[in-house]
């Protein structure tokens, strides 16, 4: 909601990034130079999103996932549960497996389901809890017990790196637009059971 007139808080509407700035942000998120096809894809995304920075953070995650798929590595590798693996070079990735097409523009514009599908099971379970809790992400320390996985505390790092959650003080919430995208993908189908499980855990 907008701040009240006597709150002393001024609401400032920010415009989107310019195209060049969006591509710079995307390259920073991916950690390498974009290919020509990726630059053209990013240009279409910039036009569709009106330069919304979050879209480029999420697009960077899509490209990193694509690099891993082409190189045959996993999400677990990247986020350090077992080891750290640097991003694959796109030229080398062509030699390591079948090419993986760039996400369709519609998937890049509403990327939460595709991003989530390539994350760990614990990260997806965390998203289901967050949807059930109205967008609030359970504290990292509680995730192993809630999810039933001793490594589930790493899920928050996965979600933050993909731009699916945003910090709110010392907490995290699902990022703007993500709840609706996940609900449309079926993540709210067991929301009542998830909310009940969370309530039992915290009681």
Image: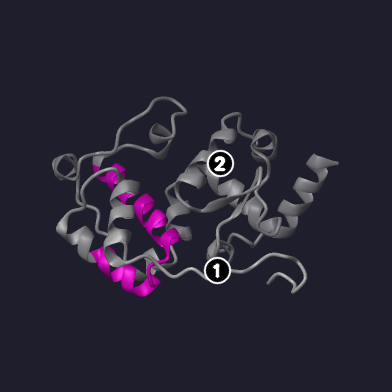
User: Residue 135: image x %, image y %?
Assistant: 65, 57
Q: Which residue is mark 1?
A: 184
Q: Within 10 Å of the Cα at label 2, are there few (<14), some (14-19), or many (20+) other Cα atoms?
A: many
**Count of numbered badges drawn on the protein:** 2
Quarter-of-image position of residue 11: bottom right
* Residue 42 vertical position relative to residue 99 in the rendered view, above or below: below
Report the residue at 43% width, 54% height from top: 115
Q: Within 10 Å of the Cα at label 1, are there few (<14), some (14-19), or many (20+) other Cα atoms?
A: few
Q: Which mark is residue 91?
A: none
Q: Which mark is residue 156?
A: 2
Report the residue at 59% width, 59% height from top: 187
Nearer to the camera, 139 or 151: 139
Q: Nearer the viewer, mark 2 or mark 1?
A: 2
User: Residue 159: image x %, image y %?
Assistant: 51, 46
* Residue 144 vertical position relative to residue 62 in the rendered view, above or below: above
* Residue 5 left/right relative to 180: right
Report the residue at 67% width, 53% height from top: 136
Locate the C terminus and report the quarter of the image it occupies.
top right
* Residue 138 left/right relative to 95: right
User: Residue 94: image x %, image y %?
Assistant: 15, 45
Q: Main secondary structure of the magenta part?
A: helix
Report the residue at 17% width, 54% height from top: 35
Q: Which residues are magenta?
A: 41-70
Q: Residue 109 magenta-drawn?
A: no
Q: Residue 52 magenta-drawn?
A: yes
């Amino acid at each position: 909601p907008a701040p009240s007139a006597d709150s002393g808080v001024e609401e400032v509407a920010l415009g989107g990034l310019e195209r060049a700035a969006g591509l710079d942000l995307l390259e920073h998120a991916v950690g390498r130079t974009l290919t020509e096809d990726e630059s053209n894809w990013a240009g279409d995304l910039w036009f569709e999103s009106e330069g919304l920075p979050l879209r480029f953070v999420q697009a960077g995650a899509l490209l990193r996932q694509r690099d891993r798929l082409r190189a045959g590595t996993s999400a677990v590798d990247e986020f350090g549960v077992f080891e750290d693996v640097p991003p694959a070079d796109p030229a080398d990735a062509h030699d390591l497996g079948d090419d993986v097409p760039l996400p369709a523009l519609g998937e890049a514009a509403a990327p939460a389901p595709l991003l989530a599908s390539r994350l760990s099971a614990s990260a997806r379970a965390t998203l289901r809890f967050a949807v059930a809790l109205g967008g609030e992400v359970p504290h990292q320390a509680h995730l192993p017990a809630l999810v039933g996985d001793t490594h589930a505390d790493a899920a928050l790092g996965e979600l933050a790196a993909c731009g699916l959650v945003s910090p709110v003080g010392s907490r995290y919430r699902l990022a703007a637009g993500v709840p609706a995208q996940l609900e449309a993908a079926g993540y709210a189908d067991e929301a009542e059971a998830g909310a009940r499980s969370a309530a039992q855990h915290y009681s």
